[in-house]
Image (cartoon, rainbow, N blue to C red):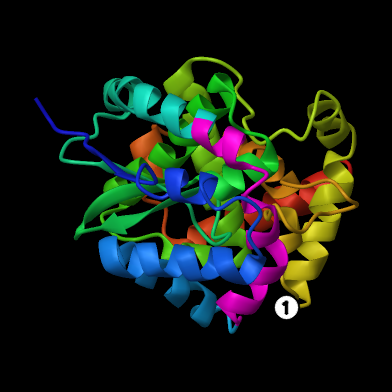
Amino acid sequence: MTESPLVDAAEGLLPVLRGMGDPTPEEVLATWEDFYTHHFPELYARQVEDYAEQGADWRAVALARVFPALRQRLPAMEDARERIVRLWGEVMARARRVTGLEGEVQAVVHVGIGCGAGWATTYGGKPAVLLGLESIAELGWQAERRLEGLIAHELGHVAHSTWRGEPLEELESDPFGLLYVEGFAQRLEHRILDRESWHLALDEGWLPWCCAHLPEIARAYRDRAARGEPVHAFFGSWSSFQRVPFTGHFLGHAAVRVLAEGQTLPELARLPLADVRASVDRFLRALAAGA
């Protein structure tokens, strides 16, 4: 049987945080850094490097955005950790049935510095899904159905990379490629769970709003991409389009549904970047024009 291990890089830290009483953000940072540099140095380095690649000071961002609320979010983080430990194997098994994924894929549950609730990457040289409890708690995603969706979404990225035979970074560096990558993972989230799972929906009004404003979202996205402007507002939890987060995932899913017509998912996963760009741009232009 193919392994799908879970690395619990939060179990040892959560009791320490709970025992700190009412710490300052600086004290939490020092505790966090000491724990991860000693016990999970690769995980520590991966997150620090992610900030460096963005030209950001991880300590400044974490002190402002993450560590001040970490102590108050402990109950949500503890709940999320317990559920992830229980759900990981089940969702992984579903993903294998739907995608045919083989080989070891591991989950890494941790308390991070705001690098995301989910991150499909590698750990110890093997495919991995990093699950950041601090971001999960901040977003309020600790409920079971949300976590199932999050795990399935990240496993969608793993399957996409496996089918392509290469990492997804080149695609993600292009605004049209990024839309395709996130839309593909969202489509697989639905397939793996066999339901219309939108784990990242802000509230019950998120999906109707996205449906009603889809041409507007498409127009704004294409305009920003054409001007060479960043499109992170459509994807991040700390940024948004018209104060609505994750609209890019909805737009990407709509694009991938069109691109998928007449193709299997593995075929769709292997589209060259030039074809992705042309197809997504054509989709956006048609949608923005009201077609």
Q: Is residue 14 above or below residue 33?
A: above
Q: Is residue 60 above or below residue 109?
A: below
Q: Which residues are magenta?
A: 56-78
Query: Can you see residue 231?
Result: no
Q: Residue at x 83, y 40 (%)?
A: 214
> What type is the residue that disc 1 sits on?
Gly
Badge 1: residue crowd in 10 Å (few <14, some 14–19, many ≥20): few
Looking at the picture, tell me which residue is in the foreground, 243 or 101.
Answer: 243
Q: Is residue 97 above or below residue 16?
A: above
Work out which residue is located at the far top of the displayed protein and give it.
Answer: 194
Which residue is labeled 1 in the image?
A: 228
Which secondary structure type mostly characterizes the magenta part of the structure?
helix
x, y percent for residue 197: 60, 23
Q: How many marks?
A: 1
Q: Residue at x 66, y 54 (%)?
A: 22
Q: Is residue 74 magenta?
A: yes
Quadrant of the image occupied by residue 207: top right
x, y percent for residue 85: 36, 29
